[in-house]
Image (spheres, rainbow, N blue to C red):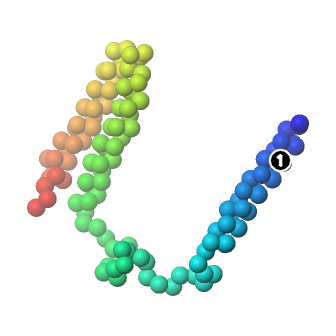
């Protein structure tokens, strides 16, 4: 089978799959009319606009969460390759953790962890 035939066959299968998903969605939908009601939030009426502003404190909490999240993203694979890479991997990870700790210390000093 040539590359052109294989590509066209794959394109045909993809188009059939997409058409099948759209057809299944059309078959199981409740109505064809667009939704004109308010957004659903556990059955309650919204009390504020969806794009209302958050308090500035939440942005620092978000940055702290991302710092710890990135720590875990890099530490899990690191635990798998540490024995193969050797002591250099340990030094690099502790430098990375020191950088994250400096960010947490800065946030602590600025009062990002105070809730009053």
Q: Residue furthest left?
A: 116
x and y percent of residue 14 in the render? 74, 53
Q: Quadrant of the N terminus?
A: top right
x and y percent of residue 38 in the render? 43, 82
x and y percent of residue 114 in the render? 13, 55
State the residue at coordinates (78%, 47%).
10
State the residue at coordinates (32%, 27%).
93
On the picture, is 92 further left or further right than 14?
left
Give the answer, above or below, for where 92 lies relative to 45: above
Q: Is residue 5 visible?
A: yes
x and y percent of residue 46 in the render? 34, 80
Q: Residue furthest front?
A: 28
Callout 1 environment at 10 Å: few (<14), some (14 to 19), or many (20+)? few
Which residue in the protein does label 1 denote? 9
Give the answer, above or below, for where 89 lies relative to 75: above
- Mark 1 residue element: helix
On the picture, is 20 further left or further right than 87?
right
User: What is the quadrant of residue 71 in the picture?
Assistant: top left
Give the answer, above or below, for where 23 lies relative to 30: above
Q: Is residue 46 visible?
A: no
Give the answer, above or below, for where 41 lies relative to 77: below
Q: Quadrant of the C terminus?
A: bottom left
On the picture, is 14 further left or further right than 56?
right
On the picture, is 34 further left or further right than 55?
right
Total marks in image: 1
State the residue at coordinates (62%, 72%).
28
């Amino acid at each position: 089978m040539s590359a052109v035939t294989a590509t066209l066959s794959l394109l045909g299968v993809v188009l059939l799959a997409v058409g099948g998903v759209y057809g299944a969605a059309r078959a199981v939908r409740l109505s064809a009319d667009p939704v004109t009601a308010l957004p659903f939030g556990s059955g309650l009426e919204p009390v504020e606009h969806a794009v209302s502003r958050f308090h500035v404190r939440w942005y620092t909490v978000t940055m702290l969460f991302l710092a710890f999240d990135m720590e875990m993203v890099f530490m899990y694979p690191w635990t798998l390759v540490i024995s193969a890479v050797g002591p250099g991997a340990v030094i690099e990870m502790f430098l990375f953790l020191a950088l994250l700790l400096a960010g947490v210390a800065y946030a602590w000093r600025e009062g990002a962890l105070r809730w009053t």
